[in-house]
Structure formats: structure tokens, C-alpha cells
Image (cartoon, grey):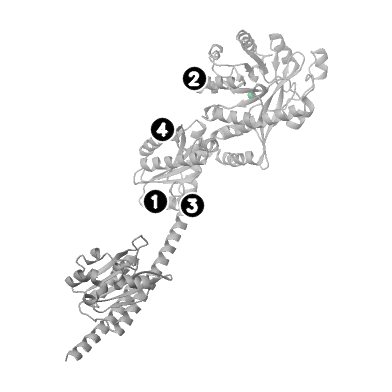
């Protein structure tokens, strides 16, 4: 009777083990993650298999070689937390679980309470009626990572057939774990690829690739609910300079800070992206002009706060262009280009924010072309310096020269400085271009010196107002001097009257610093601005260059003649040198000489010439007056005055 009962019991168990295997296979197919798979298998073992306790332990690579329970099902009642098992070869390493992990084979413990090797757990197992156990190793990727242990309430509960089925279950579970781990690794790799492709690694913001899709989605949503959205393009100033002077680590750090500030300023209806370099984009859904203006003001105020890095304080500024869907454009590309146009406009005006207006598009095509080409011009070597001699009026001796910037583009041809300088200013390129001009002039001075040539005076280099606005201007100048080894005493810096007016206090400080370095300073196009001569006393100035419009009209217009005369008189009183610009005729030369003007520049003496011509023809030539007038000084030279690109003295 007893035997047939045992047999029946064994058959029941084998049957349940079979059901268990089939249920666990279903769990394997459904499994989404490792942890829930382990819990499902343990649950199936107790619910379908009818065992008292089923648990899975993973080996830890700690000093005690402990076993970490990762899932269980059944009546545990604190057994696992107190079991304190190890997979080391020690007293606490004799359990079925311990040995299965250590040895890597199935371990049976048919009579726990009478097994002297398991005395450590006798009391706890007895209380919970764990009478026999089997543990099956879990092998993943050639390594035993842990085991599943199953406990039954009677001794000798596991038949050979049942153990075989449970081994199959453990093997399936191992395969399931391996598959999930592999899939997770693939998913992580895919997620990483996605992150790299669509998110900026520095700031974590959506990148330019991602932006296109996001903007298209936002426009589609706005179209559907008939709302308006604003696109902000924020361009930061001085990141390039900071990178060059303090290293990319500093510049990158500032970009991250800006990204965080932007994210902190916008609410859920806005999305921040990095457009590349020092440009950020904000897509602001459901926006109004009022909300947009407010946000722009907050952004500008936030980035103006100094950034402290490595015990240094960095000031940056920015310009924001804003365009609206649907009023300004109805597609991502146009919306972006309009925000960019508005940004360029406000950047050229010294920063701030600007909403796109229709009339901005009129000159767009040419301007965009110029911007694109100009950005390449520096790199491709299409910018050139021409030189125009400065001449002593009486004897026609050259006493220095002015370096003038010229641009010959392979596609657009010669582009007038009057056209491209405002574009360069609009793109904030003048600090870079100005640095190139100074550096190139220094290299030419070095070249002439090495050839023993002499221009008998200083080389004048024009400095734009935007360069003075650049907080890194003095550092750039110092770097050029260091790199070229040219002394500042060879150079006169020319700045316009209007740049003095932007921030007189600061200008005065910068000019003092330049003077301190050894440069002399000239005010260009003098008389056209609104500064009084008395006002000039505040600035350390050496030379005034009288604007060419006065010279042009002086023979016909007594007023202009009087202005020249006054400038000359007061400059003399203040101890300043004067240079008359734009002298084109012998009559003008004579009239200026009569008024007491000593120095001049103009086509009458020499047009601006490329480096090779200037070097070959002008340097070491004693007299630049046309031959006839050098003798008589009264005969008008027969000379054309056609104004071409190369003749403009704007630079
Ligand atoms: Mg000039």
C-alpha cells in the first residue's frame, strides 16, 4: 500500500515537473527582462510544481564569496535572509545551492535534517519543514552565474526522472537569461547609437539631426490645433575666443552651463536643442509675441551673468533671432533661415533679440551668399592686404602706408569692403578678420625687414568698432605680436570716430593699454562723426585722418575748406599729427599744403597696391609725386580717377 502510494506520489511529481517545464517554457517566451523571468520561474515552481520553496541565487565576487538571492517563491519566512550561504569551499558552502554553484553540477540533498554537512541550517530548515532539496546550476556564456534551488516537504522527494526534467528547466532558464542579456546589450548599443545620432554628447540636448524632425512635428501639431509657434536661434559670442585662449574644456563647460540655464528657463511648452557650435535653438509652442519677448529677455539676462570656471570669470553675450509659424514661414527650413536672418541683424547691431520682419528677406539671397563665402574666405586665403602709401605733401616722400583689406572670391569676384564689412560685422566675424589683418600686416613688416626694405613710417591697420567690443581683443593683439615678433612701434591702429562713442570709458582704457604696449593710435575718417575736438582730449590719440569728403569738396566749398583748416589748427594745438585722406589732384595737394597740412593719402600719389607691387615699386622709392609735379609742383597730372573696388579705402 505504502509502495503504491509512493509510486503514485512519484508519478504525480514527475507529471507536475512536466507541467512545470511547459509553464516555464511559456514564461521564457514571454519574458521581457531578467528579473521578472526569474520571479516567474520561481513562482511556477511552487504554484505548479507544488514545492515548498524555490529560489534563485547568483554568486557574488566578494571576499566571502557569498550568494545573493535574486528571486524566490513559496514559504520562505525569513529563511533566505538568514541562510548566509557561500559558494566557497567552507561550512556554509555545503548546501545544494552552494555546491551547485561551486562545482557546476546538479546537487541533491535527499534528507536535509539528517545530513551532518547541513547542520548549519538544520534548525531553520526544520522549522519550515524543508526536508529535501535539489539545486541546479545556471550556466550563462560558459560560466556558472548561480543556481536554482527547490525544496520539498518530504525526504527523498526528487526522483531521477524529476531531476532530469528540472535540469532541463534550469538549462532553458540559463538560455533565457543569456538571450535576455544579449538582447539588453543590443538594446543598449542601439540606444547609444540613437543617442549619438540624435543627441549632442556635450549638453545632452537634441542635436541638429534630431531638430529637423522635432521642428517638423511641432509645426504639424501647431497646424492641427491652429496655434502659433516661435523658433528662437540663439548665437553666443566669444566661445571661439575662449576656446582659443583657455582651451576647449573651458568653452565646453560654458556651453553646458548655457544649455542648463536655457532648460531651466523654459517650461513644458518649449524644447531646447543644440544647433551646433555656439548656436542653440528653442522651439516654443503655443507662443505669443508677448511670451516670446519675455523669454528672450530672460535668456539674455541669464547668459550675461558671469560664468565662474577654474577661479576665472567669463563674460559672454548672445543674439537671438525669432521667427513665427505660420506668419513668417510654414516649413522648418524657412523658419530656421528667418530666425537666422533676424539673429544676424541683431548681432550686427551689437546683440539682443529681434523678431523676424518681412523686409529682412529682400537682401537675403546676396547676403546669405556673402556670409557663406566670407566664412570660407579666411580659411581659403581669399582675403588680401593692399597697401596705400602715406605721403609727405611737400616732397612726396612716403612716410608709412595703410593696410587695406580686400576680398577676391573665386565665385563672386571682387567684393567691395563697403559691402562685405557690414556682413562680417553682422556675423560677428570682425574680431577674427581683424586679427587676420593685424597678423598679416605684421608678417609683411617682417618680410620687408628681412629684405632690408623700409616704408619710412608706420603701417596703419584699421580696427573696427566690433573688434573693440570683443572682450578678448587685447589678448588677440598680444598673441599676434608674440607670434610674429613685430614691435608695436611699427604699427598705427586706426579706429573710427563712432567706435569712440559706443562706450567712451572702456574705449579710453583699451586705448591706454594699446598705447602702453607701444602702438600709436589714429582716428580715421575724422569730421564725419559727432565728436568735438575738445572731446578727443579724453583719448590717447596720435593722429587725425581728415575724412576724404572734406578734401573732395574743399576747392569748391569754402565750408569744407574751413573745416579742414579748423581741424588742422586745433590738431596742431593738441600736438596731433594730421593726414588728409582722398587726395586726387595736384590742386587739392597744393591747397592742403597751403593750409599747413603735412601728410596725405590718395590716388594722386598712389592707389592701394597688392603686396608684390607695393614691395617692388614703392618701398625704397624716394618720391611718390608724379614726375612733372615733383619738379614744378603746379602742373595737374593727367590721371584717371575711376573708382573701382580696389580703389575704395574702406576697410
Ligand atoms: Mg583707414
Residue drawn at x 77%, y 14% as measured from the top left: 395
User: Mark 4 sits on what residue?
Assistant: 305
Pointer 2 and pointer 4: residues touching (CB < 8 Å)?
no
Q: CA gap, disc 3 to disc 1?
A: 22 Å
Q: CA gap, disc 2 to disc 3?
A: 45 Å
Point out residue 374 in the picture as x, y percentages from the top left corner.
Answer: 61, 39
Residue drawn at x 58%, y 27% as measured from the top left: 464
Position of residue 262 relative to residue 440, above or below, is below
User: Mark 2 sits on what residue?
Assistant: 505
- In the displayed structure image, the side of residue 233 where residue 107 appears, left or right: left
Position of residue 462 relative to residue 565, above or below, is below
Mark closer to the chain start, 2 or 4? 4
Number of numbered discs visible in the structure rendering: 4
Q: Quadrant of residue 189?
A: bottom left
Mark closer to the chain start, 4 or 3? 3
Point out residue 255 in the picture as x, y percentages from the top left corner.
Answer: 46, 41
Does dot 2 land on a helix, a strand or a loop? helix
- In the displayed structure image, the side of residue 386 where residue 231 appears, left or right: left
Q: Quadrant of residue 89?
A: bottom left
Point out residue 72 in the picture as x, y percentages from the top left corner.
Answer: 26, 68
Does the numbered disc 4 mark a residue whose Cβ is under 8 Å from ligand 1?
Answer: no
Mark closer to the chain start, 4 or 1? 1
User: Mark 1 sits on what residue?
Assistant: 223
User: Mark 3 sits on what residue?
Assistant: 209
Amino acid at each position: 500500500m505504502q509502495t503504491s502510494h509512493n509510486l503514485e506520489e512519484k508519478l504525480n511529481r514527475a507529471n507536475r515537473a512536466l507541467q512545470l517545464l511547459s509553464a516555464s517554457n511559456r514564461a521564457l517566451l514571454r519574458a521581457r527582462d531578467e528579473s521578472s523571468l526569474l520571479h516567474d520561474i520561481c513562482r511556477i515552481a511552487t504554484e505548479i510544481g507544488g514545492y515548498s520553496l524555490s529560489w534563485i541565487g547568483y554568486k557574488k565576487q566578494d571576499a566571502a564569496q557569498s550568494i545573493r538571492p535574486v528571486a524566490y517563491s513559496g514559504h520562505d519566512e525569513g529563511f533566505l535572509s538568514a541562510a548566509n550561504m557561500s559558494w566557497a569551499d567552507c561550512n556554509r558552502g555545503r548546501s545544494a545551492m552552494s555546491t551547485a554553484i561551486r562545482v557546476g553540477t546538479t546537487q541533491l540533498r535527499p534528507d536535509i535534517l539528517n545530513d551532518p554537512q547541513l547542520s548549519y541550517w538544520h534548525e531553520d530548515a526544520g522549522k519550515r519543514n524543508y526536508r529535501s532539496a535539489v539545486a541546479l546550476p545556471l550556466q550563462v556564456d560558459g560560466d556558472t552565474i548561480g543556481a536554482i534551488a527547490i525544496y520539498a516537504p518530504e525526504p527523498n522527494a526528487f526522483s531521477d526522472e524529476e531531476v532530469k526534467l528540472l535540469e532541463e528547466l534550469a538549462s532553458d532558464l540559463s538560455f533565457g537569461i543569456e538571450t535576455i542579456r544579449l538582447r539588453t546589450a543590443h538594446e543598449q548599443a542601439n540606444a547609444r547609437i540613437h543617442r549619438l545620432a540624435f543627441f549632442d554628447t556635450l549638453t545632452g540636448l537634441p542635436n541638429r539631426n534630431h531638430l529637423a524632425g522635432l521642428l517638423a512635428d511641432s509645426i504639424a501639431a501647431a497646424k492641427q490645433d491652429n496655434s502659433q509657434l516661435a523658433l528662437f536661434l540663439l548665437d553666443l559670442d566669444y566661445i571661439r575666443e575662449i576656446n582659443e585662449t583657455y582651451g576647449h574644456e573651458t568653452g565646453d563647460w560654458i556651453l553646458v552651463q548655457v544649455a542648463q540655464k536655457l532648460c531651466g528657463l523654459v517650461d513644458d511648452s518649449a524644447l531646447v536643442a543644440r544647433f551646433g557650435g555656439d548656436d542653440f535653438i528653442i522651439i516654443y509652442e503655443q507662443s505669443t509675441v508677448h511670451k516670446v519677448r519675455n523669454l528672450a529677455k530672460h535668456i539674455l539676462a541669464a547668459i550675461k551673468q558671469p560664468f565662474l570656471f577654474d577661479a576665472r570669470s567669463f563674460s559672454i553675450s548672445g543674439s537671438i533671432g525669432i521667427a513665427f509659424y505660420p506668419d513668417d514661414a510654414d516649413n522648418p527650413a524657412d523658419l530656421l533661415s528667418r530666425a537666422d536672418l533676424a539673429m544676424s541683424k541683431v548681432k550686427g547691431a551689437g546683440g539682443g533679440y529681434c523678431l523676424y520682419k518681412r523686409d529682412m528677406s529682400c537682401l537675403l539671397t546676396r547676403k546669405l551668399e556673402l556670409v557663406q563665402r566670407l566664412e570660407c574666405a579666411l580659411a581659403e586665403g581669399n582675403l588680401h592686404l593692399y597697401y596705400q602709401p602715406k605721403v609727405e605733401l611737400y616732397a612726396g616722400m612716403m612716410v608709412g602706408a595703410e593696410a587695406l583689406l580686400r576680398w577676391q572670391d573665386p565665385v563672386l569676384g571682387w567684393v567691395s569692403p563697403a559691402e562685405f564689412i557690414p556682413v562680417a560685422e553682422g556675423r560677428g566675424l570682425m574680431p577674427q578678420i581683424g586679427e587676420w589683418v593685424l597678423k598679416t600686416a605684421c608678417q609683411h613688416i617682417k618680410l620687408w625687414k628681412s629684405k632690408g626694405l623700409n616704408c619710412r613710417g608706420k603701417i596703419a591697420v584699421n580696427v573696427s568698432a566690433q573688434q573693440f567690443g570683443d572682450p578678448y581683443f587685447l589678448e588677440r593683439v598680444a598673441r599676434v605680436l608674440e607670434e610674429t615678433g613685430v614691435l608695436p612701434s611699427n604699427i598705427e591702429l586706426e579706429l573710427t570716430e563712432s567706435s569712440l562713442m559706443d562706450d567712451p570709458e572702456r574705449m579710453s582704457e583699451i586705448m591706454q593699454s594699446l598705447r602702453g604696449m607701444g602702438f600709436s593710435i589714429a582716428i580715421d575718417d575724422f569730421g564725419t562723426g559727432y565728436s568735438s575736438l575738445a572731446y578727443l582730449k579724453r583719448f590717447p590719440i596720435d593722429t587725425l585722418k581728415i575724412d576724404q569728403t572734406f578734401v573732395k569738396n574743399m576747392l569748391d566749398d569754402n565750408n569744407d575748406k574751413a573745416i579742414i583748416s579748423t581741424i588742422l589748427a586745433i590738431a596742431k594745438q593738441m600736438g596731433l599729427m594730421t593726414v588728409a585722406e582722398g587726395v586726387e589732384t595736384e590742386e587739392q595737394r597744393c591747397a592742403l599744403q597751403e593750409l599747413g597740412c603735412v601728410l596725405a593719402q590718395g590716388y594722386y600719389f598712389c592707389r592701394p597696391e597688392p603686396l608684390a607691387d607695393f614691395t617692388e615699386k614703392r618701398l625704397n622709392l624716394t618720391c611718390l609725386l608724379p614726375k612733372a609735379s615733383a619738379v614744378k609742383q603746379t602742373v595737374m597730372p593727367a590721371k584717371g580717377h575711376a573708382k573701382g573696388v580696389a580703389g575704395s579705402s574702406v576697410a
